[in-house]
């Protein structure tokens, strides 16, 4: 049975100094970034929700000096930080935290 998709939308994943255009999908088990076909980096990135330590909101800098409130930073238990550019960053943050909490509760862990 496929995991239920809880939220989806356009979302860019920062890779080095550039964002990779694509879509992100939040399911009951994963946070999944799928690059657009035209993206240079075509590797999908899947994060198991149980690996998420915390989710923060932030700002990206357009043209190096215009702050835009459109970033979520997902910190993994390994210490790796993944940054996504999304619309509705607060709603994404709440949805990821809720899904990660539910995934941890099913396995007896706490997030």
Image (spheres, helix red, strand yellow):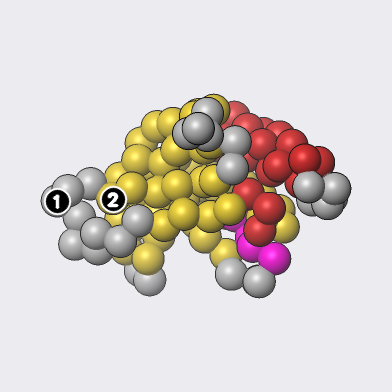
| Numbered disc 1: secondary structure | loop
Residue 66 x %, y %: 41, 49
Q: Between residues 76 and 58, which one lies in front from this camera angle?
A: 76
In the image, residue 5 sits, relative to residue 43, either above or below, namely above
Identify the mark at residue 35; answer none if there is no mark: 2
Q: Is residue 60 visible?
A: no
In the image, residue 83 sits, relative to residue 27, either above or below, namely below
CA gap, disc 1 to disc 2?
A: 8 Å
Identify the residue at horizontal 66%, vertical 36% (top origin). Answer: 99
Horizontal placement of 96 versus 71: left or right? right
Q: Quadrant of residue 41?
A: bottom left
Q: Between residues 9 and 68, which one lies in front from this camera angle?
A: 9
Q: Is residue 37 magenta?
A: no
Residue 20 x %, y %: 30, 56
- Count the labels in the image: 2
Residue 42 x %, y %: 24, 59
Horizontal placement of 19 versus 104: left or right? left
Q: Between residues 60 and 3, which one lies in front from this camera angle?
A: 3
Identify the residue at horizontal 19%, vertical 62% (top origin). Answer: 40
Q: Main secondary structure of the magenta part?
A: strand
Per the image, the residue denoted by label 1 is 38
Please rate how many residues cluster around mark 2, counting C-alpha atoms within 10 Å: few if below 14, some from 14 to 19, many from 20: many
Q: Is residue 45 visible?
A: yes
Identify the residue at horizontal 59%, vertical 36% (top origin). Answer: 28
Query: What span is in magenta?
Result: 73-77
| Numbered disc 2: secondary structure | strand
Residue 25 x %, y %: 45, 38
Label 1 close to label 2 by CB (< 8 Å): no
In the image, residue 92 sits, relative to residue 22, either above or below, namely above
Q: Quadrant of residue 79?
A: bottom right
Identify the residue at horizontal 58%, vertical 53% (top origin). Answer: 48
């Amino acid at each position: 049975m496929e995991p239920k998709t809880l939220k989806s939308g356009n979302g860019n994943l920062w890779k080095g100094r550039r964002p990779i255009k694509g879509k992100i999908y939040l399911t009951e088990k994963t946070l999944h970034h799928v690059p657009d076909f035209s993206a240079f980096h075509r590797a999908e990135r899947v994060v198991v929700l149980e690996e998420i330590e915390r989710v923060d909101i932030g700002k990206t800098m357009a043209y190096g000096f215009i702050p835009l409130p459109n970033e979520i930073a997902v910190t993994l238990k390994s210490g790796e930080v993944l940054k996504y550019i999304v619309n509705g960053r607060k709603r994404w943050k709440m949805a990821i935290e809720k899904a990660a909490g539910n995934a941890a509760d099913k396995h007896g862990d706490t997030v």
